[in-house]
Amino acid sequence: MKVLKTYIIPRLIQYLLVIFIGITITFIIPRLTPIDPVQSAINRLTSYGGAYMEPEAVASLQNTLKELYGLEGGIVEQYFAFWKHLFTFDFGPSLSMFPTPVTEIIANSLPWSFFLLFFSLIISWIIGNILGGLAGYFKEKKWSNVLAVVAMSIYPIPYYVMALILVILFVYIFPIFPMMGGYSVGLQPTFSWSFLLDVLRHSILPAISLILVGIGWWFLSMRSLTSNIVAEDFVTYAEFAGLPKNKLLFGYVMRNGMLPQITNLALQIGGIFNGAIITEVAFSYPGVGSLLQKSITNGDFNLMMGISVLSIIAIATASLIIDLIYPLFDPRIRYR
Amino acid sequence: MKKKAWLVTFVVLLVGMAFSQVLPNIPRSETLIVDILHGRVGNPGNFNLWIPGSLAGHGPQQVLMDALWYVDPQTGEWINALAAQEPIYNDDFTQITIKLRQGLYWSDGVPFTADDVVFTVKNIASHPGMNSSAQIQMYVKDIYKTDDYTVVIELNSPNPKAHNIFTSLVYGALFIQPKHIWEKVDNPLAFTFNPPVSLGPYVLDSYDPQGYWFLFKKREDWQRTSVGQLYGEPKPNYVLFIYYGTDDKKVAAQARHELDMIFDLTPEAFEVLRARNEYSVVWYEDFPWAWMDDVNSRGMFLNNARYPLDNKDVRWALTLAINIEDVVISGYAGIERVTALQSCPTQYFTEIYYEPLEPWLENFTLDDGYKPYDTNVAYRIAEWAEESYNIEVEDPEAVWGIGWWKYDPQEAEKLLLDNGFSKDRNGRWLLPDGTPWKISIIAPADFEIDATRLAFAVADQWRKFGVQVNVETLEAGPLWTRQALGDYDVGSFWGGMLASSGIPDIWTFINGFKSDFYTPLGTAVTTPNNYRWKVPDKVDQIIDDMGASYFADPKVVELTKEFYKVAVEEMPVIPMVINKKFNANDNYYWTNYPNANNPYMANVSWWAEFKFMLPRLEPTGRK
């Protein structure tokens, strides 16, 4: 009961507050930008010479679009209407892809972002932490230094450069991987092995790019953490006590090193809901990242809000879950 | 060991080639692969082209939908598509009779008749959110059929332009809906029209739910379409619209013959492509390669409501401070056609307006008697091109335009000094009140790259002249908003009176400049007059007279010339260059695309008239 009062409830309140403030800010910021979605839509119609409209017709369209887009009324009115809809996860229609509902557009793209980013993250997290942990524990070994040099060389490479190198190498020079898309032209999504293999083939290169850069970061941070932990008194004491090396490495050193890495992992999983704009652009891979970017440049408030709200909720939820299950990993919390 | 390494590399490449081909299940030699205009389509399952914000340039308007009439802006050819002949107006332009083409069928076997046209107009008019609804409500009093192939529209007021709404002057038009499908739809704004029933020569085969590709298959009954009746069988059995991504990917795809038609590349990207694919051609076989007949010019839009740009002399001073030759050569590597008129120097408009008006341009004088026109611009650029590229240019004016305004900083200085401007000791211009003259140019940030380049090139020219100029690049959202509100000094824009089409009538482009529609700064415009040009009474009269004339009336040409003369005198916007494109076509699998040697139509894969190119393409026979 005490745990509920002193630990769980305050965190739940904090969680709700973070979501409320985050969403409110996300609602306000686009409306402070010098973008009028109605004007953007009309310009898309008229600027490219495609549609001629009399001035009276444009004026009428302006009013109609305001109504259809839900942009009528003052900002406060819009704000309350927004919260009302939010409880049913209704973000309204996309303004740039009217009238397709924002939820439908996100639902269509999110699985691709999630699939690619989640597995890339988990793979890079596992490999990076294991290698980093070993390299930190055995830091006097030659292979440890070699790994550190490799990781330090990869990690600072800007991601877009890494992506470009992979595309040039494995799409242009050695055309092993496909040039674009989530699966081959002409295929229709089905739950068949051939389709899944095709999807996998299309995601290998973007995944490699994310994993390579990801491993560099996880490796370096874990190596640095374990290097410090190795020098702690409790490790020295355990060593003197004659504990087996395996137990020492995994039970004492790496387990302690994992704590901040778990927090980071949770936050990054939350960030998946933002997509990965550069990955999507470089590999022409489907996902929510390019949608978010397009929504910002086109003044598509609803889509922008939809993706941002999901992201805020995901990150806040991930932090909450970590806070709540942290005592499982770190017994010290349980004793407080 | 070496042998093994080679073997492994060979196997990897072989497997890779098989692995990476774009069309694993479709015969490549029967497929035309076209770049998607808008990039990835966010809502690919929506084929409802009649709602605001709908995208159409990924195939639906090019191969599925059809309109009553088309005009080709390259040649001025009028095409009766769903209609059998031009619109027939009564004497006072209050009624249009439309005769429809017979023997056309929707892809599901239902005949196309007057019922479809009547239904489309009524359906759109009764749903205010749909595209063109406001216009139809303004125009149409009643619509009915007199027989299965004749439609009569009663207009609310005399309107000889009413048929424009059904005509693809450029890009698209009001497409006709299949009545038998749409009449069952409760909410047309929410209807996705998927699968789309086609009136064009292809049907939708499949599409990527992620919006990267759309595959269309030729109809077995292609003879029962307007394209089939007019031009014969479309040659490709499949048309694949695809978005590969950034320019470098499109270049790689065309270099591998996996993309036949590219929407547009940067000159640099085309340079790379040319080196890698000898079959890639845009328009000219040699320099300047590009297609320079797109129907819009770019210009420096001077905010006529902002001091000191509200002064005609200041606007002319800025014009004469630009060395257009320098702009074209340094800013565009010599690949641009100049325009002295506030119009668009396409092949067609050059014939009907630029050439006839050249004597007037040569004799035109400013208020102080100065003759600003320069007839030799194209020849000087051609001389530079001949030296730089070792080519021979037969007709420089056909490539670079008939002429532009003189680069004459002395005359520009005189105009400013006469208006109270002065210079500080560093040679920078001061306004009459002694404060520095600063100009900010707004331009697109990461789209319409030629407009961005123009902004920087002109900024350089004006800086040389002593004006403090800053270029502000903006994303589409803020750019359009600031343009509409008039929140800029100078904009590197396009459109409005700088547009053209395949008919001589420019009323649709200039009607918004009438004094009645003048909008003060800070209020969003509903017209192309975002630069707030306060037109002289004469322009109001021209617009009214033109508005009352049928497009083919010879009077329209004369009125248009008069309009251009006033625009030159007033210089509300400095017309600069045409909207060129590096829309490269790969002649490896398909050939006979429109080009400089055979300009049978505009070289466009993104406009609705693209459908008429498909029967004229020829397969090369390569497998």
Image (cartoon, grey):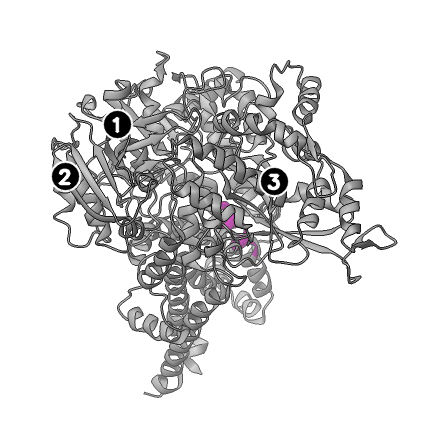
Residue drawn at 53 percent across, 63 percent down: B522
Secondary structure beneath label 1: loop
Query: Within the image, what quadrant is residue B224 found in?
Result: top left
Give residue B145's mark: 2
Residue A122 seen in this snapshot: no
Q: Which residue type carries mark 2?
A: Lys
Q: Is residue A233 above or below residue B218?
A: below
Report the residue at 38% width, 24% height from top. B77
Label 2 to label 1, Cα distance in Å?
16 Å
Discs 2 and 1 share one subunit: yes
Q: Which mark is residue B568?
A: 3
Per the model, the C-alpha gap separating discs 1 and 3 is 37 Å
Q: Which residues are magenta?
A: A212-220
Local SS, label 3: helix
Name the residue type under label 1: Gln
Q: Which mark is residue B85?
A: 1
Give coordinates of residue A248: x percent, y percent.
49, 62
Q: Position of residue A332 (x, y in %)?
A: 45, 77
Q: Earlier in the sequence, mark 2 or mark 3?
A: 2
Label 2 vs label 3: CA separation? 46 Å
A322 or B508: nearer the viewer: B508
Who comes first in sequence, dot 1 or dot 3? 1
Q: Amino acid at mark 3?
A: Val
